[in-house]
Amino acid sequence: MPSSRIAIFPGSFDPLTNGHLDVIRRTARLFDRVIVAVLVNSEKRVVFTVDERVAMINESCAGIGQPGQVTADAFEGLLVHYAKRRGACAVVRGLRSGIDFDYERPMALMNAHLAPEIETVCVIGADRLAHISSRLVKEVVGLGGSVEGLLPDSIARRLVARLRAGKSAV
């Protein structure tokens, strides 16, 4: 067993939302270290590059927990292989609804098959944030709407600038 309890919170985080931050804050109370792992997926059209997302996550999470307790990183390939390399004992998934549970359950079972020593821990999202998703905030910004209170302010400014300029990372 690792000497510290490390959790991996994986996702695309394009962009990081206040819903993600809620899960990260709550996970940091349960684990010694939290690695917010940005999946590298060249097939997916994204607004921000992997490096930009890692930097924005590190900036947004700087005040969570003890210094260095929450960090961002990028990974490719199977999540459980990455989790093993990082010495993690858990993968954290945020759930907003039963639809999220139905999506996450088969992945959790496959991860358990591949790496039974790594637990999947589900954190139920706060009701007040349940409507927030990266896909929806991008859509709202793209159509000229406000995302105030849905994202960290610095990320919201970057998202608005990027989408209103008609640019994306891919």
Image: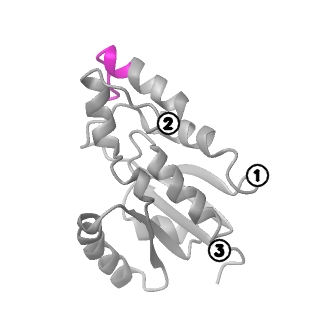
- Magenta-drawn segment: 162-169
Do the residues bearing badges 2 and 1 touch, measured as CB atoms within 8 Å? Answer: no
Asked if the magenta segment contains residue 165, the reply would be yes
**Label 2 residue SS:** helix
Residue bearing the label numbered 1: 67
Residue at 45% over, 51% down: 19
Residue at 42% over, 51% down: 129
Q: Position of residue 101 (x, y in %)?
A: 29, 70
Task: Name the residue type under label 1.
Answer: Pro
Q: Earlier in the sequence, mark 1 or mark 3?
A: 3
Residue bearing the label numbered 3: 5
Q: Residues within 10 Å of mark 2 (few under 14, many from 20)?
A: some
Q: State the separation of the CA atoms marked 1 and 3.
A: 16 Å
Task: Name the residue type under label 3.
Answer: Arg
**Label 3 residue SS:** loop
How many numbered circles are shown? 3
Q: Residues within 10 Å of mark 3 (few under 14, many from 20)?
A: some
Label for residue 51?
2
